[in-house]
Image (cartoon, helix red, strand yellow):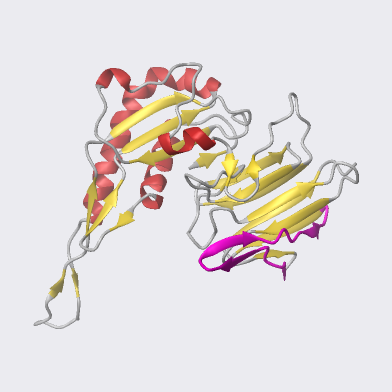
Amino acid sequence: MRQTGNRVTPEEIVAAILIELEQRTAPGYYTNYVPNVFKIYLFRDDYRDLLPLKDKIRDEAIRALHEELHRRNGSPVLALPLPFAKKKQRKRYEAMGDWVIEFHPNEDDDAAQNRLEVRGETSRPVEPGNLEGSPTVKIMRPEMEDTARETRRTGSAQAVRPNAEAYARLSYEDDTGHHDFDMVKEEIKVGRGGPNEWVDLKLITTKDVSREHFQVRREAQTGRFLIKDLSRFGTWVNMKRITPSVEVQDNVEKDKNIEEPLPAKAEINLADVITVHFRALKTK
């Protein structure tokens, strides 16, 4: 889970943890398994300001997680609204170990624009002395260490230019509220993201929005913008669906590299779930 905007508050951290809990739930046949480890990555200013509150934030987060599991494991529901109806038991939700809340500084180039990132994982509890990250090192998931900042279809993500000027601004509202995202690279991906799907703009929303939903690219020579649909359920630009670029052959996704012009001002709709308002700031 990632958030852009102003200074991060403890309330936003706890809310983001609960959203990550929802997204990382693994349905079982009888039990839904939820992550027990939540790694919080903060922009350095927020990390410094909130570090004195880390124990309080951790206590509130664990309390909220306990309450959420209790709510989900509440009373069974009736299969039929009849006096003799048998009760149908809900699937239980079970955490894969004791709750662990870790705090780390985010050293990514775009950390100032993405001030809060929460990653839910499943592992055994760590020792109390290892709950905090180094002030200068970002700890990544083991499965991401060899392919850090890579995307499944187009290779390495571009580095952000020092003191970068924004090419465009994307405004949107997801499950965590309203946000503005400045595009400071020639190419960005937008979607829910995932362990093997790096996105520059991560949306917290339903699974109808793909992990990699669409891509925006700016041509350096002409300054024009192009959009590519990478999604499962479609992308619309100004109420017109654009041609999907990804096709599935023998259960393998293939990117046909189909791009369409993106107007300097446009509404981009993702699977009829989220609308991203795109505005070019620099066209040449």
How far across and down, in percent of the image, does residue 137 sit? Answer: 49, 20
Vertical comparison of 133 with 35: above or below: above
Q: Does the magenta stretch include residue 258?
A: yes
**Camera-side residue of 201 and 143:** 143
Q: Is residue 11 visible?
A: no
User: What segment is highlighted magenta in the picture?
Assistant: 240-264
104 vs 93, left or right, is right
**Camera-side residue of 81 and 237:** 237
Hey, which quadrant is residue 37 in on the image? top left
Vertical comparison of 35 with 241: above or below: above
How far across and down, in percent of the image, does residue 93 sit? Answer: 24, 53
User: Residue at left 68%, top 45%?
Assistant: 188
Q: Is residue 224 magenta?
A: no
Q: Residue furthest left?
A: 84
Q: Is residue 93 visible?
A: yes
66 vs 255, left or right, is left
Hey, which quadrant is residue 183 in on the image? top right
User: Residue at left 57%, top 67%?
Assistant: 248
Hey, which quadrant is residue 67 in on the image? top left
Vertical comparison of 69 with 157: above or below: below
**Camera-side residue of 178 and 39:** 39
Vertical comparison of 281 with 174: above or below: above
Q: Residue furthest front?
A: 250
User: Residue at left 63%, top 31%?
Assistant: 110
Q: How many marks?
A: 0
**Camera-side residue of 77 and 44:** 44
User: Residue at left 59%, top 29%?
Assistant: 111
